[in-house]
Image: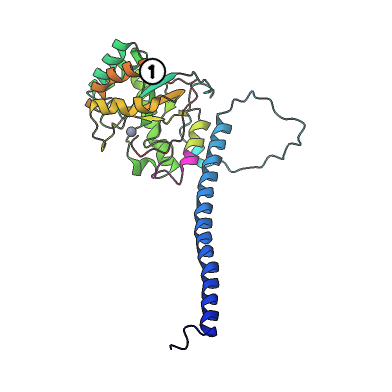
Amino acid sequence: MHGYIGSVRFFKNLILLAVIVMIAVPSAFAGYYRHAYTRLKAEQTETEELHQDVEVLMQKEDEPQESDEPQPEALSVDVPEYQNLYPDFYAPQPLEANERVENTIYLTFDDGPSEYTDKVLDTLAAKGVKGTFYLVGTGHTDAKSLERMRRIVAEGHSIGMHSYTHDYNKIYSSVEAYLDDMYQIFTLIKETTGVTPTLFRFPGGSINSHNRGIYQELTSEMLRRGFIPCDWNLSSGDAAGGHFTEAQLVQNVVGSAGGKKRGVVLMHDTKQTTANALGSLIDQLKALGFDFAPLTVSTSPVLYTYESNNG
Ligand code: ZN
């Protein structure tokens, strides 16, 4: 054994070992990084394709067509059955959401109406600000709730569909189930307020862990019917789970608003903290130089944020 260490054979084996290590270790790392890169690239491509899809869908029809290129033959595509469902479930005007007014904040309130909606409306009126309310039907068909829906409209705010049940498992189980649920909130808002709603917001945002398999079909089918989805790019964090104080809710929004040209703020008028914090939030956003506006059928929406499921 003693003779082996220091022998020619020992050094030969040592060099061989060193060569093996030099080859094997970088290969292992390269393999790992290649795998990680491929996965990242696939996710990125998926996101880019989605944005392109939506941009194409949102583009106005009056854009000039390239005519010198040979036009491909139209493919005959089988139309999904669900396109024939609810023939009166269409937005009342053509899709033209392309308006981008800079330095504008769009305050949005989901999941209501609730007992705190009145205070939210009082504050908005006192500050001279218009917002947008995405309504839920379940539990909100009593006289008081219906009265609040009418008050939202009467005071000049925008009203939109959030869903009837807000039950993720139910509404995201199929395109048909989603349409069935949305047709119910569409009908409730129309019959209660006289406004045919065009705006809507997906519970959990347009892409979430519950609708992952069908979100493209859902968005595409709703756009085909003329409805306009909007996500958010500023979150107050007021949804269940985030136990923020009023000052923290304000800071969550104001702290991220600075660099934004347009901000869509996610809030819930079902939260007392939100109702209490709203006045201060508006004052601080005004101090940053922002104006406020309700989302309308002309507003270019903010889409596809990847925030946590608190919509
Ligand atoms: Zn919600």
- Which residue: 48% across, 31% down? 87
**Percent x, y of residue 198:** 45, 24
User: Vertically, is 180 above or below 23?
Assistant: above
- Which residue: 35% across, 14% down? 129
Q: Main secondary structure of the magenta part?
A: loop
**Percent x, y of residue 115:** 22, 23
User: Vertically, is 121 above or below 142?
Assistant: above
Judge the density around disc 1: few (<14), some (14-19), many (≥20) Cα neighbours within 10 Å.
few
- Which residue: 50% across, 40% down? 216
Which of the 4 quarters of the picture holds residue 232? top left
Whether residue 230 is visible here, answered yes or no, is yes
Magenta stretch contains residue 172: no
**Frontmost residue, 46 versus 90:** 46
Q: Quadrant of the C terminus?
A: top left
**Percent x, y of residue 200:** 42, 28
Which of the 4 quarters of the picture holds residue 167? top left
User: Vertically, is 44 above or below 30?
Assistant: above
Residue span colored magenta: 208-218
